[in-house]
Structures are given as structure tokens and as C-alpha cells.
Image: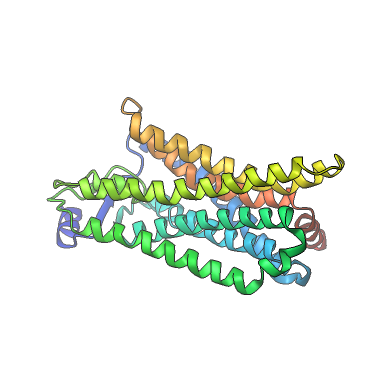
């Protein structure tokens, strides 16, 4: 009854149920979540620390990796701590409008950084002589500002659209974070505008960004195949494989999560929720590891500080 009064008095307050059906396994799930989260934090903070300490890494690519690490930390932190509070302490109350805005804004920013990294690889391979003039630190700052403004503009309507929906007495969400569509489905009013905006946002942000990344790598592959010396092929391809691995990890999990939500009506609810959680946890953990292993200069600097310790 206390929970009902709390949510009824504040239209932005909701109750998260966690993962319905798996309450008995919360301890084991929380161990898995916290392990992935801690590994992700350690990896991304290591990247930020090493890039910050080493002046030789004050290059565009490593600045982009630092921005990617910051967004990875933001995405996982917007989901995991609250989920662990539900699993460990049964603290289920949350302001969904705030979490929805922050989560989607950081996700859009994350996608924009992927596009910028792909563009960086394209310029480095297809126009190496003009690289330093095309991609300057000043231009990177402008691209970062554009990405931030785009993220805010796309994410801001989500909490505003949610706030206008009537939820009657239904403020209990069968999820462990405030996914936009999970909140929308709890409404007792017309959700057409919210559904439409969600689809438009997915198409414009995810669809357009994936097209730009695919275009960049298509042009890169064409340029590589035109290289007369076959000995240069492995080096040229190696500059792209790291980013492709990271992109595939995110895209595969996103596709699985999206397809099960849209077309998996026969799939158990807890499967939907776990897939959505893995979309935020696994890429965050793997991104820093993949870049750390595949980027030779960064790997050497990380080894230097690790061995020193």
C-alpha cells in the first residue's frame, strides 16, 4: 500500500519488479551482473587512466577510445546499480523519466562515437596524407558537441512523451530498468505517438549510423583491394578489425534483444529482460578488452603500468 501511494502521488515514480519468475535466482544473477559490471569498469577506467597519463597517446584515435569508454561506463552505470539494489535490497522505487532520458541519451552518444571512429579509419586509410588536416582536435571537439546535442534532442522527447501518458494505478513495471517501451506498455491510454517515435528514433539513429559505418568500411575495403602491394593488406585490414569486432558485438545483441521484443511473443518475459540487460553489459565489458588487445600501442602502455604495479 505504501508503494501504491508513493507512485500514485508522483506520476514519474514507478516500481521496478526486477526479473519476474527468477526471484529465487537473484543472488546468482547479481553475482553475474556485478562481475561483468566490475570488469567493464576496470577495463574502461584503465583505458582512461593510460590515455590520460601517456602524452604519446594524445592522438585522435585514443581520444575517441576515451570518449567510447566514458559512454560505456555511463550506459552500464545507468542500469546495473539499480538492478543490484533490486536484487540485494528489494529497493524497487525509481524515477523512470530521469533514467529513461539518461539511458537513451548516452546510448545515442555511444552510437555517434562508433560513426566517428569509422570515419577516422576511413580518412586514415583512404586519405592518409590529408589525415592531420581533415581530423584536427578542434574538429573532433565540434563532432563531439554535435553528437551531444543530437543525443539530447533525440532523448529529451522520450520522458516528455511518457509524462503525458495516463498510467491510472499501474506504475509497476515487470523489468529491472526503465526501458521506454516497457514503461509505455504500462499505460492505460493511447500509446501510438510513443510507439511511432520509438520506431523513428531507432530507424534514424541506429539505422542511419549503421549505414554510415557500413559505407565507411565499404569504401575502406575498396581502397584496400586497390593497394598494389599484397603485403600491405594485413596491416590495412588490422586497423579495421578491432572496430568491426566491437560493432558486431553490439549489433548482434541489439538485434537479438529487439527481435525478441517485437516478434517473440511466445518467449518468456525473463528471457526478454536478460537479453536487454546483456545488451548493456557485454559490449561495455568487451569494448575495452578488444581495443586493449588489438591496439598495439595501447596494449603496450597498459602492460607498462600493469607490470609496474
Q: Is residue 30 above or below residue 96?
A: above
Q: Is residue 243 above or below residue 70?
A: above
User: Residue at the location (82% across, 58% down)?
Assistant: 307
Query: In this view of the protein, which residue sits in the foreground, 159 or 219?
Result: 219
Query: In this view of the protein, which residue sits in the foreground, 136 or 279?
Result: 136
Query: In this view of the protein, which residue sits in the foreground, 225 or 201?
Result: 225
User: Residue at the location (63% across, 43% down)?
Assistant: 218
User: Residue at the location (21% across, 59% down)?
Assistant: 163
Q: Is residue 11 above or below residue 294?
A: below
x%, y% of residue 153?
A: 37, 64
Residue with the most extreme bottom position: 138
Q: Is residue 215 left or right of residue 181?
A: right
Colour scheme of the rendered structure = rainbow
Q: Is residue 95 visible?
A: no
Asked where in the image residue 149 lies, by quadrant, the reply is bottom left
Q: Is residue 1 left or right of residue 252?
A: left
x%, y% of residue 243?
A: 65, 48
Q: Is residue 195 visible?
A: yes
What is the quadrant of the C terminus in the image? bottom right
Q: Is residue 191 left or right of residue 71?
A: left
Q: Is residue 219 above or below residue 267?
A: below
x%, y% of residue 227?
A: 80, 44
x%, y% of residue 295?
A: 75, 52
User: Residue at the location (52% across, 45% down)?
Assistant: 211
Give the mark count: 0
Amino acid at each position: 500500500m505504501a508503494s501504491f501511494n508513493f507512485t500514485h502521488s508522483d506520476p514519474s515514480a514507478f516500481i521496478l519488479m526486477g526479473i519476474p519468475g527468477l526471484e529465487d535466482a537473484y543472488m546468482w544473477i547479481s553475482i553475474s551482473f556485478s562481475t561483468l559490471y566490475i570488469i567493464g569498469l576496470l577495463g574502461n577506467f584503465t583505458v582512461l587512466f593510460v590515455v590520460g597519463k601517456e602524452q604519446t597517446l594524445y592522438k585522435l584515435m585514443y581520444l575517441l577510445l576515451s570518449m567510447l569508454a566514458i559512454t560505456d561506463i555511463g550506459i552500464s552505470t545507468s542500469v546495473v546499480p539499480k538492478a543490484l539494489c533490486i536484487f540485494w535490497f528489494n529497493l524497487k522505487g525509481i524515477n523512470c523519466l530521469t533514467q529513461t532520458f539518461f539511458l537513451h541519451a548516452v546510448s545515442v552518444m555511444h552510437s555517434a562515437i562508433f560513426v566517428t571512429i569509422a570515419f577516422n579509419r576511413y580518412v586514415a586509410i583512404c586519405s592518409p596524407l590529408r589525415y592531420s588536416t581533415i581530423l584536427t582536435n578542434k574538429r573532433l571537439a565540434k563532432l563531439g558537441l554535435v553528437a551531444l546535442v543530437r543525443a539530447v534532442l533525440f532523448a529529451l522527447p522520450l520522458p516528455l512523451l511518457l509524462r503525458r501518458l495516463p498510467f491510472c494505478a499501474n506504475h509497476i513495471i515487470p523489468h529491472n530498468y526503465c526501458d521506454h517501451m516497457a514503461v509505455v506498455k504500462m499505460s492505460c491510454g493511447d500509446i501510438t505517438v510513443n510507439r511511432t517515435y520509438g520506431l523513428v528514433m531507432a530507424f534514424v539513429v541506429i539505422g542511419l549510423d549503421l549505414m554510415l559505418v557500413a559505407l565507411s568500411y565499404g569504401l575502406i575495403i575498396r581502397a584496400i583491394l586497390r593497394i598494389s602491394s599484397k603485403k600491405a593488406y594485413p596491416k590495412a585490414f588490422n586497423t579495421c578489425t578491432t572496430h568491426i569486432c566491437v560493432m558486431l558485438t553490439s549489433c548482434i545483441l541489439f538485434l537479438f534483444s529487439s527481435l525478441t521484443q517485437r516478434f517473440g511473443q511466445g518467449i518468456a518475459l525473463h528471457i526478454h529482460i536478460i537479453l536487454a540487460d546483456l545488451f548493456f553489459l557485454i559490449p561495455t565489458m568487451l569494448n575495452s578488452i578488444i581495443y586493449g588487445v588489438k591496439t598495439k600501442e595501447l596494449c603496450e602502455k597498459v602492460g607498462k603500468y600493469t607490470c609496474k604495479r
